[in-house]
Amino acid sequence: MTALEPAPVTGRPRSKDAERAIVDATLEALVEQGYQAMSIEGIAARAGVGKATIYRRWSDKAQLVVDSVRARGRFAPLPARTGDLAADIAAMLELSLVCMKGSDGVLIAAFAAERIRHPELGREYERVCLAERRQRWHELVAEAVETGRLPGDTDIELVAEVGPAMLWDLIHLRSASVPRDLVARIAAQFFPLASEPT
């Protein structure tokens, strides 16, 4: 169970103020110090809580960092399926764009770099934040292939990565401004048959 999941009500209720302070302290430490240098002790001091308060909610530093990034709102729930494949693909692209362009751009860039350096952080990130999104992209592309809206020989795994990868490259690697029609252009270029069967 992670800190963001409901827990049985036993003993003293959790302090939401304390959780917010811990999350804020964790994200500040990640940006300022990096994952390797930051510590539970330092985070506790920043947040004005004891180490035990943190360990009651999170089992280790990797879980704390990933849950804190998620709690900031960057990993919003997946959009509901509408039955319109083209609309569903556009919604997933818009979700990725909003997440990458959000006000915490420095945070997500720092987090992305740290998860590459530290496998335990990367594994927790994949489990908590990416697995569900990868599965949705795979389902959308597979559906497009199965219904004849994309060619039968489409590399589903590869195409499922195209949209998010292009957004990441433009926003975080090239630091370019994002055209207003970017989502529509990606959808038209890489999912040109998604709106109607061939």
Image: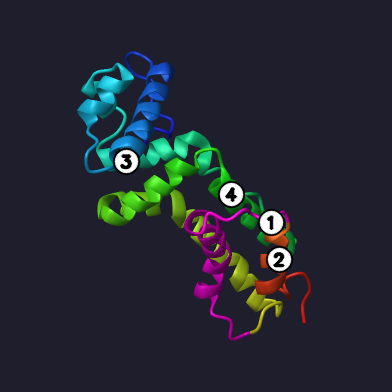
The residue at the far top in this view is 12
Q: Earlier in the sequence, mark 2 or mark 4?
A: 4
The percent coordinates of residue 40 (x first, y second) are 23, 30
CA separation in Å, label 4 and label 3: 21 Å
Answer whether labels 4 and 3 touch (C-beta < 8 Å).
no
Q: Earlier in the sequence, mark 2 or mark 3?
A: 3
- Judge whether 88 appears above or below 159 on screen: above
Q: In this view of the protein, which residue sits in the foreground, 115 or 31?
A: 31
Q: Nearer the viewer, mark 2 or mark 3?
A: 2
Q: Nearer the viewer, mark 3 or mark 1?
A: 1
Q: Earlier in the sequence, mark 4 or mark 1?
A: 4
Residue at left 66%, top 50%?
80
* Residue under pointer 4: 78
Look at the image and say whether residue 115 sits in the magenta stretch: no
Answer whether labels 1 and 2 touch (C-beta < 8 Å).
yes
* Residue under pointer 3: 63
The residue type indicated by label 1 comes to Pro
Task: Determine which of the numbered discs, if any, sits on residue 185 in the image.
Answer: 2
Badge 4 marks a residue whose secondary structure is loop
CA separation in Å, label 3 and label 1: 35 Å
Answer whether labels 2 and 4 touch (C-beta < 8 Å).
no
Residue at left 55%, top 38%?
103
The residue type indicated by label 4 comes to Leu
Q: In this view of the protein, which residue sits in the foreground, 64 or 179?
A: 179
Q: Earlier in the sequence, mark 1 or mark 2?
A: 1
Residue at left 48%, top 34%?
72
